[in-house]
Image: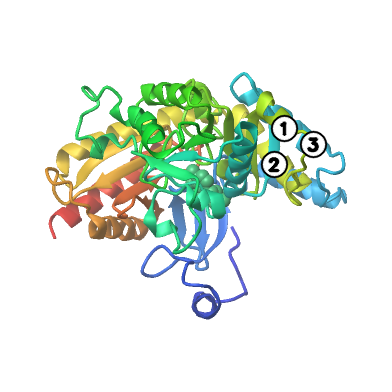
Amino acid sequence: MKVKEKGLTKEEILKIRKSNFPPTAFLYYKDPIQLVKAKGNYVYDENNKEYLDAIGGIVCNSAGHNHPKIQEALIEMIKSDEIQHTSTIFLNEHAAKLAKKLVDEAPKGIDKCSFTNSGSEANELAFMAARHATGEGMVVNLKHGYHGGTSAALANCGQHTWRFRAQPVSNVVSAQAPYCYRCPFNKSPENCHMECAKDIENTIQTSTSGKIAGFIAEPVMGIGGVISPPDEYFHEAAKIVHNYGGKYISDEVQTGAGRCGKRFLLSTDLNINADMITMAKGLGNGAAIGAALMRSDIAETLTGKLYFNTFGGDPYQTMQALKTIEIIHEENMIQNAQSMGKLMMDNLKELMKKYELIGDVRGRGLLIGIELVKDRKTKEYAKEECIQLMEMLKESSILVGKGGLFGNIIRIAPALSINKDEINRIIKAIDESLYKISRK
Ligand SMILES: Cc1ncc(COP(=O)(O)O)c(C=O)c1O
């Protein structure tokens, strides 16, 4: 594979970033990596050093980087002079086909689809629709949740690091997170009676008028540290939300596109009684596309109003999303995500027996978190050790992500095509790195 022959050096890029990027732009690693090429599960720096991408870009790489079928389709589209930009004001087959496909993949009753450029915008649209449909303002979210960088999405973010001073956060309220490892009620899953789900009701009763517009939750809370509630949580949560007149928004920006379940959407697998589902990231395999899916009765309430998004539904993005879904099914990637996710999880659980530093491993399918703690009793956040582990994995040419309110959770989310050998390689590298860290 040919790598970059000319262009800015790493040092030049760093210099420009230092001068011209705001300090909100963050980088992974002491010595940041410049990525210039990619294929499948592998990415390459400017010196052609290969890395196994175990975080999938940033949980976007579902079908694998530069999948040949997507490359071919893009080349064909460019060569044919097919229209590059048109909006949903005009008819276009790709957006229509994708809307139909996503509705087919969604739980029964969810049959309308709007396109956006990102997950944040999809969530903005869902908040707007929930508020418009109910005539209520209040949205309940979860502590530790993340829903994007735009205004309403940020207002619903349950982590201080992503929130900015003096921003309006009215009309939102946070319920306790279903964080079993650090249960806010000091219970264990065997005897908790779903206290965390009941907290949604308590929050509504104590902090709202008694009526709400909606509730938003990720089926697995990715950036919060891959917090993965038990299945019953979602049934209880939806019941409460609906009892108080709210619309349930299932944020599948990370969990969707086959990453976590037996089917394309985790909401379908978990039988979540959602009114709206938002998607992005893996939907386009890296193309900038988001979608907000909703029930007809909610969409109908918007009649007489206009929603427009210049690039939402763009032919290139929608074509790539369609191809991605096609590939995911044709190449049995959802089944692979399940079996490879299980293999990874089983191996990580074995490593837990060896290393006290691993406090918890959790997740669904190929969305996996390893929570590191300095002490299993006190559960003190092992933030420095998490950074060390990331750096050591980088030395072993493996890229992973980091998450959690205190940055002590390793996140793993490779392309859905990852194989056994690659999983074993990741496990071996984690084992060797933890051995060294434990002996320091
Ligand atoms: C669960 C979840 N929702 C929404 C978003 C926002 O998506 P975007 O960055 O595409 O706006 C993210 C991004 O990380 C996410 O993880």
Asked if the residue at label 2 sits under 8 Å from ligand 1, the reply is no
Do tag 2 and tag 3 residues touch (Cβ < 8 Å)? Answer: no
Above or below residue 93? Residue 241 is above
242 vs 364, left or right, is right
Name the mark nearer the viewer: 2 or 3.
3
Above or below residue 371? Residue 37 is below
Q: Could you tell me which residue is drawn at 53 percent across and 55 percent down? A: 149
Above or below residue 41? Residue 98 is above
Do tag 1 and tag 2 residues touch (Cβ < 8 Å)? Answer: yes
Q: Give the distance between the C-alpha atoms of the residues marked 3 and 1, in whole angstroms.
A: 21 Å
137 vs 70, left or right, is left
Q: Could you tell me which residue is drawn at 25 percent across and 36 percent down? A: 183
Type of amino acid at the residue the image marks with label 2: Phe
Q: Earlier in the sequence, mark 2 or mark 3?
A: 2
Type of amino acid at the residue the image marks with label 1: Ala
Where in the figure is residue 437, as x and y percent of width and height?
19, 56
Observer-nearest residue: 60 or 102?
102
Give residue 99's mark.
Answer: 1
For label 1, the crowd category at 10 Å Cα-Cα, with few meaning under 14, some 14 to 19 and many 20 or more, is many
Observer-nearest residue: 348 or 208?
208
For label 3, the crowd category at 10 Å Cα-Cα, with few meaning under 14, some 14 to 19 and many 20 or more, is few
Q: Which residue is mark 2?
A: 115
Where in the figure is residue 13, as x and y percent of width and height?
54, 75
SS for tag 1? helix
Q: Is residue 53 visible?
A: yes
Give residue 68's mark.
Answer: none
Give residue 304's mark.
Answer: 3
SS for tag 2? strand
SS for tag 3? loop
